[in-house]
Image (tube, grey):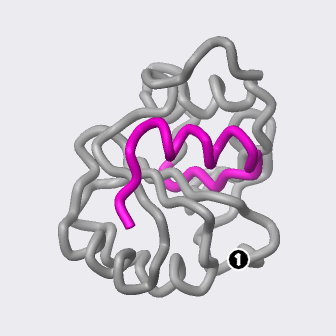
Amino acid sequence: MSLTVDQALEVIRSHKRVAIVGLSPKTDRPSHRVGQFLQEKGFDIIPVNPVHKEILGQPSVTSLEELDPDSVDWVDFFVGPQRLPDFANEIIRLSPKLVWCQIGVVNPEFNQGLENAQIPYIADVCPKIEWKEEWP
């Protein structure tokens, strides 16, 4: 089910373990800035990047396949929208409380799969931009 910004923010507010797919070690990349922001807000980030062993001081996993469903609350995607369907089976296996697709990361086929699996999602939005400062 597609969530509103407020609904999605409420989910992440109470669920602090996030896998960030496509997290970059390059400080000028939006994924890096969002990952750093989430860390500053108290989130436990799990970088998902097949190239880099560590990002933002956290060990990376090469794919979502390496994660146990109990190890992650939600998943944040920084990948090209055409790649999203490649992650569908792993998202269904993980059954996260939320799938967050960043600005420009929109794929109707992927979204329909999430709907069918009853996995909440939000697309084309950035949590760093939408964050309400009064939250911890």
> What residue is at 80 percent from the left and 36 percent from the top?
57
Is 110 left or right of 91, judged from the image as shown?
left
Quarter of the rendering containing residue 134: top right
Identify the residue shown where x is 29% and y is 67%: 83
Is 86 included in the stretch rendered in magenta? Answer: no
Q: Which residue is under mark 1?
A: 66
Q: Is residue 46 left or right of residue 30?
A: right
Quadrant holding the C terminus: top right
72 in relation to 56, above or below: below
Label 1 secondary element: helix
Number of disc labels? 1
Residue found at the very far top of the displayed protein: 133
Q: Position of residue 36 (x, y in %)?
A: 65, 26
Residue at 43% over, 75% down: 87
User: The magenta stretch spans which residues?
Assistant: 1-22
* Residue 20 drawn in magenta: yes
Query: Mark 1 belongs to which amino acid?
Result: Glu
Measured as percent of width and height from the top left, residue 114 is found at 39, 75
Q: Quadrant of residue 133?
A: top right
